Structures are given as structure tokens and as C-alpha cells.
Image (cartoon, helix red, strand yellow):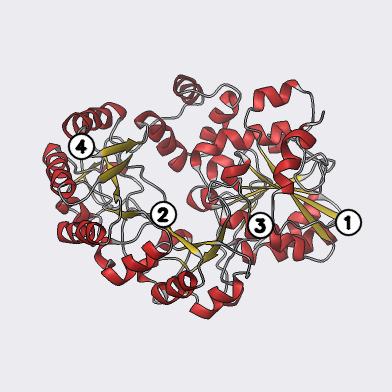
Amino acid sequence: MSYWRTTIKPLLDDETGTIHKQAPVRVTLAFPNRYSVGMASLGYQVIYRMFNQEEGVACERAFLPDDVDAFERTGQALPTVETGRDAGDCELFALSVSFELDLTNIIRTLDVAGLRPLREERDDSDALVMIGGPFTSSNPYPLTPFADIIVIGDGEQIVPVISEALREAESREDFYDLIDGMPGIFLPARHVHEPKWATAPKELLPAYSQIVTPHSELSNMFLVEAQRGCPRPCTFCLARTMYGPNRNNQAQELLDTIPDWVEKVGLVGAALSDFPHTKFVGRTLTDRGIKLGVSSIRADTVDAELAEILKAGGLRTFTVASDAPSERLRRWLKKGITTEDLTKTAHISRDLGFKGVKVYMMIGLGPENDDDITELIEFTKDLAKINRIALGISPFVPKRHTPHFADPFAGVQTIEKRMKRIQKELRTTAELRNVSAKWAWVESVIARGGPEVGMAAYQIYRNESIGAWKKALEEVGWSDEFEANTPAIGLPPGQYESKDVSAHAQGLAI
């Protein structure tokens, strides 16, 4: 039997909100990861709805199979979810990409859809390939060997422009002419540098789910965006730059988007506890018997009232972000979270009967030393005396469009050594969940790389491994231009002590 009938159709049958439409212009909106991951992406769902709202345009979804090798052995073409048509049989093949480590998955998705991954090998007989999402806003350059169009910024402003060009263009060059120069449009065949980002006007917000499914990683949850952007000055975070100026939606705007049949609502925002209507919206929903999901809450804004609302919404574990292992590093990052804030949150969580507190943080920050790790260990022991503690630890990955763009990656050995110490000293005190230092290194390469990193990924997309990445990067001539830079706690992020005479090792990074 066909892959669509045995694997996709059961997922389709369990969806609420699916759009079925026929139109002359066919768009495939692909997500280069499995179905459950893609359906948890609010941006992906918004673009799906917006294309289908366009006159003369029909959009269907496609996802990378869970076992791509097994799927390829069947000899079938990648099907769309809605009808099972060949995903590559369309005028526009668009991919929404959230994560740098999905770079090889992008190439694999194009391949299994029957499209030649390299842009230079396609012509007017092929679908146009468009890539957008958080990855492109962070760093579009590794994608330039593959994409005809790269969308940077808010998709709400872009979809009508792309749709009009698809209706009118008679060739690839015609299409380029119609969209060239628009905000957020990066054409690798014509442009060298990324354009001004597209920023959606407030009247196009809030973003909200189109489809609810039990098979999403956020099972049966309806997502609605409370705010876009962030008012906080944290130096390591892309939210302020990638999502544009902070735009808060009104409480009733959010409530009006939520259908009566919804049982779980997820509020989306970079700084939800700064959103002025979180308590009102949360209380209104919980009074209706709706379960509530939120991303992490800032510890400096937690109070008993907010915690009670979240508990009434079904939250069992309180999640906050420390983002650095010590007080001095949090100040350096302009995080604005103190030891007292985290302690207060632990007390509130215990007093209200939460099962525990999960604290997200990064290690491997530039000025970090053993004393910072000691502080993390001792403070975690103090928190564990108040309530159960889980630490989610990720290696710090410098990103473009932040002051940390030219910070060095701490190094796999350094991070692994610090993680081993943390695990040894906290193994009976806290639950530890950590991200691989080796894959964080790959992420750091992609996050600041150029087209050569994309071509390295092209060499290994069928057999990706750390060893394969190292070999491919060497073959394309990649080198780490930032490793000599030395951040210091006495300098603002973006300034470096010089270890050599290279231009990047001193002065401002951006």
C-alpha cells in the first residue's frame, strides 16, 4: 500500500482545521522534520493558512518521513498530506525551517520530493524553491546554494507578494523581477547580502493555529501569539532582532481567535510574563475549563497570582530560565535575573504544590570559568532544598545579529569537562538534561557559516555524523575565524581582548 494511505491518512483523519482547496497555482509547504515537530510550529501553520486564503492558490503540506531511508526504498514520491499528490509537483515548493541542525534535512526533503537540491541545477521546468522561518532570519547564507527565494522576517508580509508573483509570472526571471527589492526577499541568484527584514504590521497579528492534532509534540494544543518581539535587552537572544519591535496583542484579540471547542491553549511569546494581559487571559481560559500551556516564565516577574493561574491551567512543573551559571555572567548578558529571583520562584512553586522547577541555562559563555560552575552547583543544591530541581543545560552557541556574533565557541572538550563535573556533583541532587556539545559545535558552524557550509552539508546529507561534518568542512575550506577572540567580563558583549593581530580579534564584532 502507499505511504500516504498507511502513514499520512491516519494523521489527516485526526486533524481539526485542515484546509482542502483546489486552485491553478499549487504550493507545497514542507517542514524538513517529522510531522509531530512541524505541526508544533505556529509559523508553519500561519503560512499554510495564508497561502490558502490567496485567490487562485492552493497550499498542501509535506513532512520528512520518520525513517527516510526506509521510505526511499519504497520508490514512492514524497506525498502531500491533504491529497497525497507528489509534493514536488507544484509551482512553489516552500520550506519552513526552525533549527540550524535541520540544514541537512532541508536538502534531504528536496531530494525525496524529486527536486534537484542545488539551485543551479534547476530550471523553469522545476518548482521554485523558497525557504523561510527562524533559521533564515538568523543566518540565510548556508541556504543560498539551494533556495531560489529566501524569506527573512515575518511571513505575513511576504505571502501576498509571493502569491501575486506566482499568478503573474511566466518564467523564473519574471518571478524574480516581480519580487526583487521587496522587504524580506533575498534572491541568491541576484543578491549578495540579505535585505531589510520584513516586519508584519500589527493589524496582521496575532498569529494563531489553523490545525489542532493529537499527533503534534504539543498534543491537541491551540497556539496563539500573545506578543511578537521582546522588550528585554538580553544580549545573547535573537528575539528582539529576529522578530522585530515588541508588539503586544490585546487580550480580547487573543480570546476571539480561540474556537469554542478548544480544550488546550498555548500562549506564545518571548517574554510572556512581561505581556500585560497574561493573567487576565490565563484566568479567563482556566475559568472556562481550558488547560493552559506557556513557554518559560521570567523568574523576576513570577508572583503567587500568576503561579496559581498556571497551576489552574494544568501546569505541574514551573519552568524558568537562568541562562547563565552565575550572577556575574547573567549581568554580563543583561539577563536581569538574580539569585534572589530564582530562589523566590522555587519557594512559590513549593508553596503552591508544583512538582518542581525546571531551570534552563547555558554553559560555555566566553568569560566563564570554574568559579561560575561552582556557583551553579552550590546554588542548585540550595534550590533543591526548597523544591525538586531539573536543569536543562545547553552549550552557548553565538548567533549572528547579536553582540555575541564573533564570540568563540567554547569548544567540545571544555563543555564536556564542565558537564561531567556538574553531573558528578549534582547526580543525586537534581535531574540533569543536557544538549550534546558536539552537535552544538555543528550548530555554531551553521549559525555563522556561509555558502561553503551549505555545500559541506550537501556532501553528507545522506550520512550525517560529527565525523562526516569535520571531513566535509575541511574539504570545502572552512575555518573558524572567531576562535582567537577572547571575551572578558570587564568588557561589554561584542568587544574582545586581542590574542593576535587579526581584525576579528579586537574591537566590536558587529
Q: How many angstroms separate mark 2 from mark 1 (CA)?
A: 39 Å
Image point (30%, 50%), residue name: 355
Task: Quarter of the image for the N terminus: give it.
Answer: top right
Q: Earlier in the sequence, mark 4 or mark 3?
A: 3
Judged from the image, the secondary structure of the residue bearing numbered disc 2 is loop
> Toward the viewer: 457 or 73?
73
Q: Earlier in the sequence, mark 1 or mark 4?
A: 1
Q: Is residue 271 visible?
A: no
Q: How many angstroms separate mark 3 from mark 2 (CA)?
A: 32 Å
Task: Quarter of the image for the C terminus: give it.
Answer: bottom left
Q: How many angstroms separate mark 1 from mark 3 (CA)?
A: 24 Å
Amino acid type, label 4: Lys
Q: Which residue is mark 2?
A: 401
Quarter of the image holding residue 161?
Answer: bottom right
Q: Is residue 65 visible?
A: yes
Neighbours of disc 1 within 10 Å: few (<14), some (14-19), many (20+): few
Foreground mark, 1 or 4? 1
Q: Which residue is mark 3?
A: 211
| Figure check: 397 above or below 17 | above
Tell whether label 2 touches label 3 (CB within 8 Å): no
Amino acid type, label 2: His
Q: How many angstroms separate mark 4 from mark 3 (CA)?
A: 53 Å
Q: Which residue is mark 1?
A: 24
